[in-house]
């Protein structure tokens, strides 16, 4: 197959890892030079747990789904599976549609993670972080990572789109998550321009607010258009970025830097934050 053949001889895992490491290092440097918020807890307590989680997540995915997302795309493409295989589509249109549909699928999964109680129990570990910085992009429960792979893999196979488009999407998605979780202070004009197309750190930080109205907004990781279309877009936090409270409140967040506690969060008896006059 011509499209899949472009990746022959390339180690896509190495490509993804190199891009991840480069973007993580860049955003960590920007955070250090231009921080948006003070972080009293510091990196020393939070980063070891967040890094341990991403290592555990990656190991589980490689163990249970060794083929990976790009491998699934190759399998679907080589066998003519999926919508694009059935239609015989390739080229720029198939690339763009694959990228956009996958991005919407990720937005929808994130929205469902907040709306479906069982999924929220798992996803809340991500929100329990006391602060939001580039390491928070690594902080997902292993169960959520596995469910995410199943969902994304199903969409990849159903589409049967160009393999390179899937690889580019995964690299962009990882890079976008690192970027929009960063505790980075961008000039106001730059933030306004960028968020017309992509999710910026200020836009995503609203989503990590302790206020439920703000948490249930800005679900995008890459393209910002979905939150505008589905009216889940909140431009700024009520208390400002420096004054807003992040996390899930006193029940979970103070212990969230502990790896055992973080892994136990989905199994703890703790409901959604109550709608009170202080937390609306």
Image (spheres, rainbow, N blue to C red):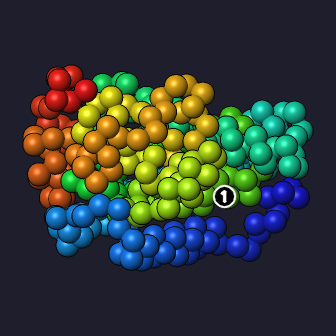
Image spot of residue 41 (x, y percent): 16, 64
From the viewer's side, name the closer residue of 47 and 234. 234
Image spot of residue 14 (x, y percent): 58, 73
For mark 1, give the secondary structure: helix
Q: Is residue 115 left or right of residue 40?
A: right
Give the vertical position of 255 relative to 151 (above or below).
Answer: below
For label 1, the residue is 167
Residue found at the very far front of the displayed protein: 189
Give the vertical position of 229 relative to 131 (above or below).
Answer: above
Residue 207 seen by the camera: yes
Of the 4 image quadrants, the one containing the N terminus is: bottom right
Q: Residue at x 26, y 67 (%)?
A: 47
Image spot of residue 163 (x, y percent): 74, 54
Q: Is residue 143 left or right of residue 64?
A: left
Q: Quadrant of residue 122?
A: top left
Image spot of residue 113 (x, y percent): 39, 33
Q: Residue at x 49, y 33 (%)?
A: 233
Disc tally is 1
Residue 58 seen by the camera: no
Q: Residue at x 60, y 53 (%)?
A: 194
Q: Residue at x 25, y 26 (%)?
A: 280
Q: Quadrant of residue 67?
A: bottom right
From the viewer's side, name the closer residue of 260 and 270. 270
Q: Is residue 29 left or right of residue 11?
A: left
What crowding class fits label 1: few (fewer than 14 Cα within 10 Å), some (14-19), or many (20 or more)? many
């Amino acid at each position: 197959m011509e499209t899949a053949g472009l990746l022959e001889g390339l180690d896509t895992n190495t490509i993804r890892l190199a891009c991840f490491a480069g973007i993580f290092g860049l955003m960590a440097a920007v955070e250090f030079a231009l921080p948006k918020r003070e972080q009293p807890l510091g990196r020393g307590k939070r980063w070891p747990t967040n890094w341990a989680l991403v290592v555990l997540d990656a190991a589980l995915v490689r163990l249970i789904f060794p083929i990976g997302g790009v491998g699934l795309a190759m399998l679907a493409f080589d066998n003519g599976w999926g919508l694009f295989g059935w239609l015989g589509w390739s080229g720029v249109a198939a690339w763009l549609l694959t990228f956009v549909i996958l991005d919407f699928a990720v937005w929808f999964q994130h929205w469902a993670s907040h709306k479906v109680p069982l999924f929220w129990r798992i996803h809340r570990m991500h929100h329990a972080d006391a602060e939001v910085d580039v390491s928070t992009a690594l902080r997902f429960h292993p169960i959520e990572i596995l469910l995410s792979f199943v969902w994304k893999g199903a969409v990849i196979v159903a589409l049967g789109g160009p393999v390179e488009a899937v690889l580019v999407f995964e690299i962009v998605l990882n890079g976008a998550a690192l970027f929009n979780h960063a505790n980075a202070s961008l000039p106001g004009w730059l933030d306004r321009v960028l968020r017309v197309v992509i999710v910026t750190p200020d836009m995503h930080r609203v989503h990590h607010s302790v206020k439920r109205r703000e948490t249930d907004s800005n679900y995008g990781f890459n393209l910002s258009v979905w939150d505008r279309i589905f009216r889940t877009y909140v431009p700024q936090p009520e208390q400002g970025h420096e004054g807003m409270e992040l996390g899930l409140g006193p029940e979970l967040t103070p212990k969230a830097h502990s790896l055992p506690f973080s892994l136990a969060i989905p199994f703890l008896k703790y409901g959604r934050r109550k709608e009170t006059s202080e937390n609306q």
